Amino acid sequence: MSAPDTTADDAPAEDPGQPRILTPRLVLRAFEDPDAVGLLALYGEPRVCRYYDLEPFVELAQAQEQLERFRARWGDGVGARWAVTDRVSGRFLGDCGIQDLSPVDRRAELGYALRADVWGQGLATEAVGAVVDHVFEHWPGLELHRLVATVDPRNEASRRVLGKLGFQCEGLLRLNTWEKGTFVDEEVHGLLRSEWVERAR
């Protein structure tokens, strides 16, 4: 029940690789070695890292390690992280995906980050919405029941993205996470499969 302008370009049955996801402006694909340069630019930007427990990257080796962690999620069956690229130019714009997949609870956690120089264009909503549609409709061997996202309440842009996609704020975890030398609050946002189905009609 994907949105009409979002299609999943599934790999052939004999190819176990991570599928591509296409949207009107974006291609979401598996990470490739050269994407380490893009990840360095993405996570080297203090504005992108502001609400992460992550200091900005300063070395390519940090980005390469992050790339391998993202790749491992698909191979280990615990999630998937897609490289978000411009559909026309192929430029690396960010990443989006799921992690901490629980086959028993049929639940996963959503995560995403886009370059600061493309904020305000609706690309985060487009990319995240495509991933949400894909994992609810196409996740191999599992009918996902629930997606969650944890957000710093100060991150208004991220909260808006989730709200546009039907996520509901389910509660505030007070001073829940140690981040950059202090405890910070976290909001939990959730989307049930039944809510996604209703929105997709």
Image (cartoon, rainbow, N blue to C red):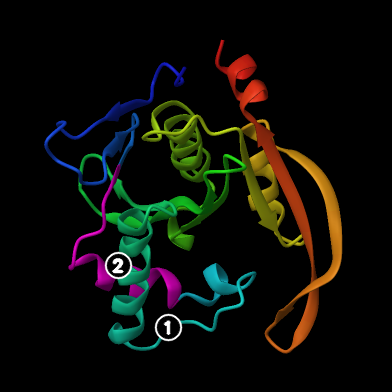
Q: Which residue is mark 2?
A: 38
The x, y position of residue 71, in whole percent, is 31, 62
Q: Position of residue 114 (x, y in %)?
A: 46, 57
- Between 86 and 152, the residue placed more toward the observer is 152
* Kind of residue sitting beneath label 1: Phe
Left or right: residue 31 versus residue 99 is left
Q: Quadrant of residue 54?
A: bottom right
Image quarter where the C terminus lies is: top right
Magenta part of the chain? 28-44
**Residue nearest the observer in this picture, 187 or 160:** 187
Total number of numbered labels?
Answer: 2
Residue 12 placed where, x, y %?
A: 14, 31
Labels 2 and 1: the sequence-earlier one: 2
Q: Say whether residue 117 is magenta.
A: no
Does residue 39 belong to the magenta stretch? yes
Tell me where residue 56 appears, x and y as whole percent: 49, 82
Viewer-proximal residue among 123 and 66: 66
* Badge 2 element: helix
CA gap, disc 2 and disc 1: 11 Å
| Label of residue 57 in the image | 1
